[in-house]
Amino acid sequence: MPEDTMQLIFFALACSVPVVLIGAVILRATSNRSLTTSMAVLVLIPTLSTLAGIIGVSGLMFTHELQRTAVVLAVVAAVTVPAAIVLGREQARKTVWEKQIREQERAAERSRRELVAWVSHDLRTPLAGIRAMSEALLDGVVTDSADLARYAEQIGCETDRLSRMVDDLFEMSKINSGALRLELEPVDLRELIDEVLAANRTTAERARVALHAEQPDTRIVVAANDHALGRVLTNLVSNAIAHTPPGGRVAISAGCSNGEAWARVEDTGPGIAEQDLPRIFEVAYRGTTARSPVAADGVPTGSGLGLAIAAGLVEAHHGDITAENRDTGCRFEVRLPLTEN
């Protein structure tokens, strides 16, 4: 048994340090295993090293006092190991949650920057057109009645485009801020599809695209806000028509499976580039030129928010929306929980 302080420190270190080193090796070897194993090893290392140091200082004499100390350490270990495991798991969950929150905040900030860049770019084009045509009218450059009518019609079209963009921005802001509140009621999905079909038939005819629906004879009742869900389907159908070449086809279908109702919009367009599929529902993301339609004047026809709004509204219905390529064109599918008929 050591007589002075220096010997006491030496014996304590000589006995406890090897235990710590062995524990470090075990901890490294089990680093890829469960959090429970790691936390148990972390707590046992100081406990066992303390016991080893006490045994070394006692000169390996297992006295009654050493037995008392060993019992105390055993009790402490029995209490601290489970507590460390529980607290470690809670801390790990908190760390993961904080990491996810930071990632979501970075993604939201990136989305906001992209949205600002999109707004500054896309709103500038119709505004420039309206300004140029209004200045031409004010300066008397255009005097012919036919030209006046054409300019007035074009200004109206550009104003409508701006109005749609502002409406989309307002809808998107409500979705992103969590301010969107929908009153859900039983809605027959088939009736909603019929309304969407009728509303988009003229657009499809103008684009020389065949538009039709395939629906079952039985009712498909879901808890929905008819206006919001109608906008989801309208956005999907408008997107499909815009990306389908003349002579192509857009089909809307509905059905039930596994306790869910589904609605699909399929087109015969060029499809979606594989690198664009993971981002197709992001704000203002149009993707590659294959899925970026332009009007006759070269200006994009969509606001870039249609699919993002559709995804937000589907989420508000506790549903899910997906996109996938097919042999020809692509398919968008909306799934919603069924309700009692």
Image (spheres, rainbow, N blue to C red):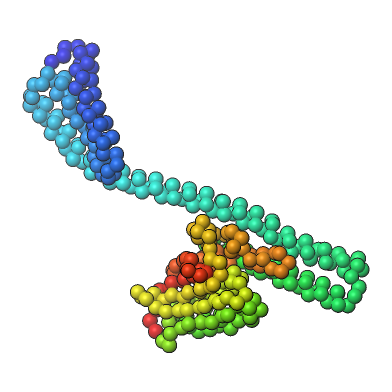
Picture quadrant where residue 307 is located: bottom right
Picture quadrant where residue 256 is located: bottom left
The answer to whether residue 28 is seen in the rendering is yes
In the picture, measured across the screen, residue 35 lies left or right of residue 57, that is right
Q: Is residue 203 above or below residue 92?
A: below
- At x 59%, y 71%, the residue is 244
Q: Where residue 75 sits in the image (x, y, percent)?
A: 16, 37
- At x 54%, y 72%, the residue is 268
In the picture, measured across the screen, residue 298 lies left or right of residue 338, that is right
Q: Is residue 58 above or below residue 295?
A: above
The C terminus: image quadrant = bottom left
The answer to whether residue 231 is seen in the rendering is no
Q: Nearer the viewer, residue 303 or 36?
A: 303
Q: Where residue 39 sits in the image (x, y, percent)?
A: 27, 40
Picture quadrant where residue 120 is located: bottom right
- At x 47%, y 68%, the residue is 326
- At x 21%, y 27%, the residue is 19
Q: Where residue 269 sits in the image (x, y, percent)?
A: 56, 70
Q: Is residue 233 above or below residue 170?
A: below
Q: Where residue 202 sits in the image (x, y, percent)?
A: 64, 81
Q: Nearer the viewer, residue 241 or 72?
A: 241
